[in-house]
Image (cartoon, rainbow, N blue to C red):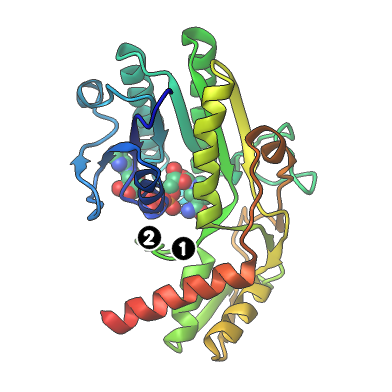
Amino acid sequence: MTQKNNIIVTGGAGFLGRHLCRALAKQGYQLKVIDLQENPEFTTIIADVRDQNKMKQLIKDAELVFHLASLIEAGESVKKPFKYIDYNLNGTLAVLEAMRVNKINNFVFSSSAAVYGEPINTPIKEDDRTIPINPYGMTKLAMEGLLRSYVEAHDFTGIALRYFNLYGPEEHHQPETHAIPRFIEQIYQDKELTVWGDGQHLRDYVYIDDIVAAHLQAIKLAQQQPHQYHYLNLSTEKPASVLEIAALIERTINKKAKIKHFPPRPGDPRVLIADASKAKKILDWQAQVDLATGMKNTVEYFVNFWQQT
Ligand SMILES: NC(=O)c1ccc[n+]([C@@H]2O[C@H](COP(=O)([O-])OP(=O)(O)OC[C@H]3O[C@@H](n4cnc5c(N)ncnc54)[C@H](O)[C@@H]3O)[C@@H](O)[C@H]2O)c1
């Protein structure tokens, strides 16, 4: 990429997509945003990434595709495996094929910690075993496999970014199953705070700005190391338990949580922490935002949001 060229973002109206599009536009990139819903800040092409013909018409005249579009709920995927396989795999394949036909070969996509399943080593390294424990994780692993085959067969440059738990302002999933936005709402609105199991589960929460920064670095990596395949953990390496998260939100909002414990969810690993040294070395990326700062920004966003709605 010689200049600030065109970039396509699928799933550009979602939580990460909105932050990423804003950052790319700020850097001077021309964007084409494709999603099933609208990103109010950018012209959005409303299209389904599974639509092969449409993708061939739309995915062209760009240097790189960020493929974020996906169904994202691990729990739902257990109940609706066909749906997850259809959306995530057919969607990814249609985007890759459109890229091949229209000669775009830089592909960066949202993989996930879910590819690992129940880890046997902590912190998890990229070459540790990958045995997903739900169809969502399996689709992410299969998306990586598909991408790798395009790197080998068609000289693509492929970067799979395995995010651990993202959090930050503007996270509005429907339904919201992620702990941080749920806990903020439950504490702020004096509702019961639902904890599955004893709350000692350790997770690695990465602030949204850090994840966006990794995507900007991925553009450079694609330029510097073309026709290669990279798969990288994005994490802070600083775990926090679910109860620690609840306590931090209590202090940030200055309100007590009404914690209610429910039975542990099957297939919820006790510890999910990554080694991020490969991303540091290859992507020149390291998480910068500490949990207290990220949480303060996130709580401020939600409190403002509720006060205005
Ligand atoms: N949020 C997390 O903690 C997390 C962790 C690991 C990986 N990821 C991955 O990161 C990506 C972005 O996550 P997010 O939190 O922003 O999710 P999100 O649900 O907010 O955004 C995903 C977007 O993709 C769109 N989309 C879904 N299917 C589509 C289709 N067939 N055609 C077009 N658009 C479609 C949705 O409308 C949505 O706007 C996803 O691929 C997700 O699997 C997220």
On screen, residue 305 above or below 202: below
On screen, residue 138 above or below 37: above
Query: Dot 1: what SS?
Result: loop
| Residue drawn at 42 percent across, 51 percent down | 16
Query: Dot 2: what SS?
Result: loop
Answer with the quarter of the image where residue 217 lies: top right
Q: Callout 1: few (<14), some (14-19), or many (20+) C-alpha neighbours within 10 Å? A: few
Instruction: Kindly identify the amino acid type of the residue bearing the numbered disc 1.
Output: Thr
Q: Nearer the viewer, residue 288 or 264?
A: 288
Number of the label disc, if any, that sits on residue 177: 1
Q: Nearer the viewer, residue 157 or 144?
A: 157
| Residue drawn at 50 percent across, 8 percent down | 153
Q: Is residue 148 left or right of residue 100?
A: right
Q: Specify whether tag 2 is near ligand 1 (CB below 8 Å).
A: yes
* Disc 2: which residue: 173
Instruction: Kindly identify the amino acid type of the residue bearing the numbered disc 2.
Output: His
Coordinates of residue 96 in the picture (x, y in percent): 38, 22
Nearest-to-viewer mark from 2 and 1: 2
Mark 2 near mark 1, Cβ–Cβ under 8 Å?
yes
Q: Label 2 vs label 1: CA separation?
A: 8 Å
Q: Specify whether tag 1 is near ligand 1 (CB below 8 Å).
A: no
Coordinates of residue 26 in the picture (x, y in percent): 37, 48
Coordinates of residue 95 in the picture (x, y in percent): 34, 26
Coordinates of residue 101 in the picture (x, y in percent): 31, 12
Q: Is residue 241 left or right of residue 211?
A: right
The quadrant of the picture occupied by the N terminus is top left
On screen, residue 293 above or below 97: below
Answer with the quarter of the image where residue 83 lies: top left
| Residue drawn at 74 percent across, 41 percent down | 277
Number of the label disc, if any, that sits on residue 41: none
The quadrant of the picture occupied by the C terminus is bottom left
